[in-house]
Image: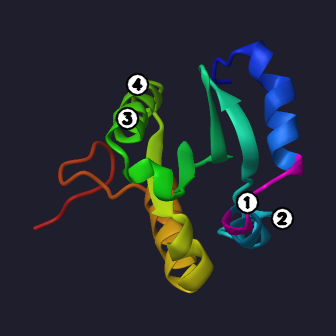
């Protein structure tokens, strides 16, 4: 289980009850293990942050960004957040709210691809075990 700041728990519950339009649209496609049978959680406290969506099985965080994330101060915060999550072994992928609203099939396709890769990493070229014949 990943560490988290317990004081964020009530805030994450509040965020679940007032999701943005983009979060609601994506949640309808992530909930109930619709992508490769993988469980996603919404507004999940991780470390000192609250991830928009999180899958423990895929070690994946999905962040949805509004227009404010184009501002330099938000970009710096996002970079630090991504670095902290990467240090915990998580992959963070980001989508703009407009992408989710207007291109949901493309967004879900990208998430599907990333989850598949995370669940089934490619075999290394020289793996142990197995047989090898000439």
Report the residue marked by disc 4.
87
According to the picture, the residue beneath numbered tag 3 turns out to be: 73
Mark in the foreground, 3 or 2 = 3
Is label 1 in a helix, a strand or a loop? Answer: loop
* In the rendered image, the vertical position of residue 29 relative to residue 89, given as above or below: below
Q: Nearer the viewer, residue 117 or 40?
A: 40
Segment colored magenta: 17-22
Image x and y of residue 110, in percent: 47, 72
Instruction: From the viewer's perspective, tell me whether residue 87 is left or right of residue 9.
Output: left
**Marked residue nearer the N-terminal end (3 or 4):** 3
User: Which x, y percent locates residue 87?
Assistant: 40, 24
Residue 115, image x, y percentages: 52, 60
Report how far apart the C-alphas of labels 3 and 4 lie in the structure: 22 Å
Disc 2 and disc 4: Cα gap in Å?
A: 28 Å
Res. 56 in view: no
**Real-space Cα distance between discs 4 and 1?**
28 Å
Circles 1 and 3, Cβ within 8 Å, touching? The answer is no
* Label 1, label 3: how far apart the Cα atoms are: 21 Å
Measure the alpha-carbon separation of dots 3 and 2.
35 Å
Judged from the image, the secondary structure of the residue bearing numbered disc 2 is loop
- Compared to 67, does 9 lie above or below? above
Give the mark toward the camera: 1 or 2. Answer: 1
**Horizontal placement of 24 versus 36: left or right?**
right
User: Is 128 on the left or on the right of 86, as rendered?
Assistant: left
Q: Position of residue 9 (x, y in %)?
A: 82, 25
In the image, which is nearer the foreground, mark 4 or mark 1?
1
Q: In the rendered structure, find residue 32 and report the number of the disc placed on it.
A: 2
- Give whichever of 74, 49 is nearer the camera: 74
Q: Which quarter shows the N terminus? A: top right
Q: Label 1, on which residue?
A: 20
């Amino acid at each position: 289980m990943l560490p988290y700041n317990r004081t964020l728990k009530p805030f994450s519950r509040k965020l679940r009850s007032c999701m943005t339009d983009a979060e609601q649209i994506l949640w309808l496609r992530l909930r109930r293990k619709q992508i490769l049978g993988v469980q996603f959680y919404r507004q999940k406290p991780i470390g000192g942050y609250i991830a928009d969506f999180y899958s423990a099985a895929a070690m994946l965080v999905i962040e949805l960004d509004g227009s404010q994330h184009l501002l330099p101060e938000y970009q710096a915060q996002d970079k630090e957040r991504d670095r902290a999550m990467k240090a915990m072994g998580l992959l963070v992928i980001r989508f703009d709210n407009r992408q989710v609203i207007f291109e949901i099939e493309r967004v879900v396709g990208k998430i599907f691809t990333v989850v598949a890769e995370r669940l089934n990493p490619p075999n290394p070229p020289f793996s142990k075990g197995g047989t090898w014949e000439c």
